[in-house]
Image (spheres, grey):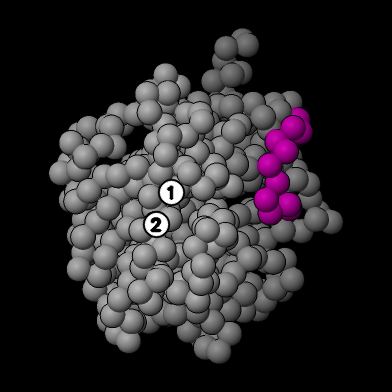
Amino acid sequence: MRTERAYDYAEHVIRRKNLVEAVKQTHADRTQGVIVLFAGFEPECSRFLQESSFFYYTGICEPGVALIIDLQGSTTLYVPNCGSVRAKWVAAPLELTQKNSAILGVDRVEHLGQQCTGYQIHPFFPRHEYEQIIEALGAVVARGGSMFTLTPDTPHQYIEQRLLLERLKVFIPNLTERLVDISPLVAHMRRIKSAHELEQMYQAIGITALAQEAAAKAIAEGVNECEVQASLEYMMTGSCAHPSFPSIVASGPNSTVLHYTVNNRAMKAGDLVVVDIGAEYEHYCADITRTYPVSGTFTPRQRELYELVLATQEYIAGLAKPGMWLSNKEHPEESLNHLAKKYLADKGYGNYFPHGIGHFLGLDVHDVGDATRPLQTGDVITIEPGIYIPEEGIGIRIEDNYWIIDDGVVCLSEDIPKHPHDIEMLVKESLEAGSDQVN
């Protein structure tokens, strides 16, 4: 696990330079202004995970900070003025101070405003805690400059940042008119993974492979879903990783519920168990699903459906390449989602595949990126077909992570068993070992 002190911020500096150039080219009519990025805020009852786009451009893992970049590329990092109070509550590997500005790759480090009342800062802040950045942004607005930031017109993206902007509007007159959304530019840049990012994703996938193996070995009749969850998450924690989303361990009828996370049912002989999990390592995510038979052997019906799901995945992986779309109703013949649905419909199971074929993957599990734009070299996506038949209590999903290359895809998770014989052997090994211990 890296520490902030040993971390190399150089790639983030390059990304910021590229962002400035992209903003200047895209908004050539707006010659005055600044780019503003906001970190996430510290939650009360869960661990802090930095807002992904802020991390992408800074590498900084502290909450409540902000970055202003002028159109000449000069950068000022604004940090909460918590004084020495925060050090008593939270251990920061690297102080965000001017003396460390060269390490951080920024020109200046300043306080957001006057000293905070506690050890952390909140979105609905009093003016004095943001006084300096309010004055800096107010000056930009006063001279007619633009504020390029992340403020998409969607119901679900960048929620904390948009709440913060709403608060800033209280103190900065005419701010609304000067806001320019750059989330499409950021999404485009984040889609294409660098060599370093792929290395981190390989690590996340490798840890997820250990977790899937632990899950398979914990599956047995009478075992509770939460016990399987505990086994697989133990492997993540022991590998300096965290679940990148709530782990899904769905057995029997629960396997037909797409985002089932209650994980409190005792598994029964003859059940299938959908294990949809992903490790987050150094901010990068994996997302892998496997389906296991509790008894160690698929029934003929289960195997028939499992092989159909696997065939669908292999078919779509064979088509995926630059120029194809993840999903585009205007071009169904080149849309992986539509082709997968047609493939299953032709086999008689079109009504039993209710979700999409996949999504972008990276700093977020459902990573930024426009699925209606063609795939590009450097994208990382999931391919995850499934069949769910509630009346039979059968749910099957197989999901892997793929890197788009010039002429196709590379399966980053190919070492994780998924062919039916290998899946059965993995579960049987544990069942036979348990039987030997009893005897």
Res. 210 in view? no
Res. 137 in view? yes
For the point 26% across and 44% down, the residue is 109
Q: Which residue was labeled with disc 1?
A: 131
| Looking at the image, residue 232 lies above or below residue 135 | above
Separation of residues labelled 2 and 1 (CA atoms): 6 Å
Please tell me how crowded label 1 is: few (under 14), some (14-19), or many (20+) other residues with Cα within 10 Å. some
Task: Determine whether the residue tagged by mark 1 lies in a helix, strand or loop.
Answer: helix
Image location (x, y in percent) of residue 439? 61, 10
Task: Please check the rendered image and state whether residue 33 is part of the magenta-colored stretch, yes or no.
Answer: no
> The magenta stretch spans which residues?
256-269
User: Which of 422/375 is in front?
Assistant: 375
For the point 74% across and 26% down, the residue is 222
Please tell me how crowded label 2 is: few (under 14), some (14-19), or many (20+) other residues with Cα within 10 Å. some
Task: Determine whether the residue tagged by mark 2 lies in a helix, strand or loop.
Answer: helix
Q: Which residue was labeled with disc 2?
A: 135
190 on left or right of 248? left
Q: Amino acid at mark 1?
A: Glu
Q: Amino acid at mark 2?
A: Glu
Image location (x, y in percent) of residue 203? 33, 42
User: Which of 28/226 is in front?
Assistant: 28
